[in-house]
C-alpha cells in the first residue's frame, strides 16, 4: 500500500513539494524560489520553463528526503497561483512567451475601458468577477495580439493555453493531458460559473479561440499520470486546484458560512456560501470551490488583497530594513505603536473592495521620530487592515456578522500580526498547527480521489489550534481604522 500523498504547490514566489502521511502530517518537503521578472513598471512575468523545472526538482527533492520512490506515492495534487496564464506549443511544449502573472497590470487600460462600457454587468453575471487586469482573459488576449504570429498559430490549432496547473499537467504528463479544474477556470473571466463551461460570448469578447483552452473537471479527478522517466515511475495526478480554494478545502471549510484567510504574497479571504451564488455590491468576487469527482462545487465569496506578505518582502529586498521576515515580529513589538505611521502597500493598485488599478503605495505620518521599527510595525498592521476591509465588505454583503476566521499561509505564523488581526477585526482568529493548508488541500483532494482516504469524515482535523481573541478597546480600534481609511484615500488622490 502506498505510504504518502504528494502536493505540488506552485506559488508566486516559490515552488514546493510536500509529502503527507495518512494523518495529514508533513513527512518531507522541498522548496525552490522562483525568479520574478519585471520587464516594465507594473508588468510581472515568470519563466514557464523555470516553473516546470522547479516543479521537477522539488518533487525529486521531497522524495529523496523521505527516502521514497514514486511507488510510495498514492497520488499527487497540484495547487497553483491562479490567474497567471501561459501559452505553449502543442507539439513541443515550449512556451511562446513568459507567463503573465496575476499581479501584472499591463492590460489595466483595456480592462478600464471595458469596465466603463455596458459589458461589466454582463461579465459579472456570467463569471462573478469584476473587470480588472487581475484575471486571465485580458492577459491571454494580450499574448495573442502582441506576440508575432501567435494568433494565427492559435487559430490553426498549433498552440495550447491555460493557467499554471494546466501547463504543469501537460508537461508532467508528457503532453498527454490538457485540462484544468473548476476553481482555476472560474478565475479566467472566460468561464461561466453558473453553466460550468467555457462561454462562447466571453471568448468572443476577449478574442480567445476556444480550441486552445483546456478541458474542465472537478478539482479531485484522475487527470493522468506523470511521465515515468521523470521520477522513476508514474505518479497518478489526481487533483488540480487553485491555491486559495485549496486552502479553503485544506481548512475543511466545507459548510456554508465557513471562512478562511490565507496570508501569502497577497491575502485571500474566502467564505463558503453553499449552493447560493452571492452577488456582491462591494467589490467582492463570486467563484467556485474545490470538490471531488461526482460532486458539484459550492459557491464562494472572495476578497483579494494584492500585496500581503509581499510587503514584508519589500522591506527585506527593497528597503533592506530586515534580513528576514522572521525579524518583523520582534521589531514590531519593540515599539508601543506605529507613531502615527500608516503604510498602504498599493504597489500594483488596490484589490477588493476598492479595485483601483491606479492607486499606488504610500507611507504617511512620518516624522523625525519615525524609526525602522515603526515602519516594520506599520507594514504588518497594513496587512491586517487590508484583510479587515475585505471582511467588512463581506459582512455587509451577507448582512451578517463573522465571529471567527481560520488562517493559514506563511505570515500567519507571526503572532503579532494574528493578534492585531483579531483586535482590528473584532473576531476570533484560529490558526491550525499545520499552516501549510494550501498544500494540504491539494493532498486531500488527490488522496480522496485515489482512495488513499476513504471519505471526508476520515479527514478529521488533526493537531491543535492557536486561538487569538480580540482585546483592543473599541474606541482605540475605531481611531486606528479611521486613520487607515484616510491613508487609503490618499493613495487614490489624482
Image (cartoon, grey):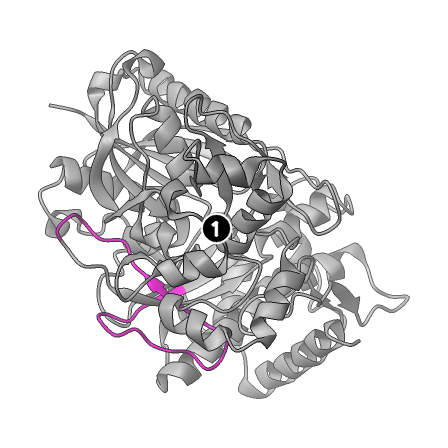
**Image-based side of 311 in relation to 353, left or right:** right
Please report the residue visible at 71 percent of the width from the left and 63 percent of the height from the top.
335
Q: Secondary structure at mark 1?
A: loop
Residue 253 lies, in percent from the top left, at 27, 61
Q: Residues within 10 Å of mark 1 (few under 14, many from 20)?
A: many
**Image-based side of 1 in relation to 61, left or right:** left
Please report the residue visible at 56 percent of the width from the left and 66 percent of the height from the top.
384
Residue 475 lies, in percent from the top left, at 59, 88
Whether residue 122 is in magenta: the answer is: no
**Image-based side of 400 in relation to 304, left or right:** left
* Residue to which mark 1 is pinned: 83
- In the rendered image, which quarter is residue 166 located in? top left
Please report the residue visible at 45 percent of the width from the left and 67 percent of the height from the top.
129
Instruction: Tell me which segment is drawn in magenta.
Output: 270-294
Q: Nearer the viewer, residue 277 or 360?
A: 277
Q: Is residue 394 above or below residue 440?
A: below
Q: Is residue 451 above or below residue 256?
A: above
Q: Is any part of residue 462 visible from this angle?
A: yes
Amino acid at each position: 500500500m502506498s505510504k504518502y500523498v504528494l502536493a505540488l504547490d506552485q506559488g508566486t514566489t516559490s515552488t514546493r513539494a510536500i509529502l503527507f502521511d495518512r494523518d495529514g502530517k508533513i513527512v518531507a518537503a522541498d522548496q525552490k524560489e522562483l525568479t520574478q521578472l519585471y520587464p516594465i513598471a507594473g508588468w510581472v512575468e515568470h519563466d514557464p520553463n523555470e516553473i516546470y523545472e522547479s516543479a521537477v526538482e522539488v518533487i525529486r527533492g521531497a522524495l529523496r528526503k523521505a527516502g521514497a520512490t514514486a511507488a510510495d506515492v498514492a497520488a499527487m495534487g497540484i495547487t497553483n497561483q491562479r490567474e497567471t496564464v501561459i501559452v505553449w506549443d502543442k507539439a513541443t511544449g515550449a512556451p511562446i512567451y513568459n507567463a503573465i502573472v496575476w499581479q501584472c497590470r499591463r492590460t489595466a487600460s483595456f480592462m478600464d475601458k471595458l469596465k466603463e462600457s455596458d459589458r461589466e454587468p454582463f461579465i459579472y453575471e456570467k463569471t462573478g468577477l469584476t473587470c480588472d487586469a487581475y484575471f486571465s482573459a485580458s492577459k491571454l488576449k494580450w499574448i495573442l495580439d502582441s506576440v508575432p504570429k501567435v494568433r494565427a498559430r492559435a487559430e490553426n490549432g498549433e498552440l495550447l493555453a491555460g493557467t499554471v496547473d494546466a501547463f504543469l499537467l501537460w508537461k508532467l504528463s508528457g503532453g498527454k493531458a490538457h485540462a484544468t479544474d473548476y476553481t482555476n477556470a472560474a478565475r479566467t473571466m472566460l468561464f461561466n460559473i453558473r453553466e460550468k463551461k467555457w462561454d462562447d460570448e466571453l471568448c468572443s469578447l476577449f478574442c480567445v479561440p476556444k480550441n486552445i483552452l483546456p478541458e474542465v473537471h472537478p478539482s479531485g479527478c484522475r487527470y493522468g499520470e506523470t511521465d515515468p522517466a521523470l521520477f522513476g515511475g508514474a505518479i497518478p495526478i489526481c487533483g488540480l486546484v487553485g491555491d486559495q480554494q485549496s486552502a479553503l478545502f485544506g481548512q475543511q471549510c466545507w459548510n456554508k458560512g465557513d471562512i478562511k484567510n490565507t496570508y501569502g504574497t497577497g491575502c485571500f479571504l474566502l467564505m463558503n456560501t453553499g449552493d447560493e451564488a452571492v452577488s456582491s455590491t462591494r467589490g467582492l468576487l463570486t467563484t467556485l470551490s474545490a470538490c471531488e469527482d461526482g460532486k458539484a462545487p459550492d459557491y464562494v465569496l472572495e476578497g483579494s488583497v494584492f500585496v500581503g506578505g509581499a510587503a514584508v518582502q519589500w522591506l527585506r529586498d527593497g528597503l533592506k530594513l530586515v534580513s528576514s521576515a522572521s525579524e518583523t515580529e520582534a521589531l514590531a513589538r519593540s515599539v508601543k505603536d506605529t507613531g502615527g505611521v500608516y503604510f498602504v502597500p498599493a504597489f500594483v493598485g488596490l484589490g477588493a473592495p476598492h479595485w483601483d488599478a491606479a492607486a499606488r503605495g504610500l507611507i504617511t505620518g512620518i516624522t523625525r521620530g519615525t524609526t525602522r521599527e515603526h515602519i516594520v510595525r506599520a507594514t504588518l498592521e497594513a496587512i491586517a487592515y487590508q484583510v479587515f476591509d475585505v471582511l467588512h465588505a463581506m459582512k455587509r454583503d451577507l448582512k451578517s456578522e463573522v465571529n471567527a476566521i481560520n488562517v493559514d499561509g506563511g505570515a500567519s505564523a507571526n503572532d503579532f500580526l494574528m493578534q492585531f488581526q483579531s483586535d482590528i477585526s473584532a473576531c476570533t482568529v484560529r490558526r491550525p498547527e499545520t499552516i501549510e493548508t494550501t498544500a494540504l488541500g491539494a493532498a486531500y483532494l488527490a488522496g480522496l480521489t485515489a482512495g488513499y482516504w476513504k471519505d471526508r469524515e476520515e479527514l478529521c482535523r488533526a493537531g491543535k489550534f492557536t486561538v487569538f481573541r480580540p482585546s483592543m478597546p473599541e474606541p482605540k480600534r475605531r481611531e486606528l481604522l479611521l486613520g487607515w481609511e484616510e491613508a487609503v484615500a490618499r493613495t487614490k488622490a489624482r
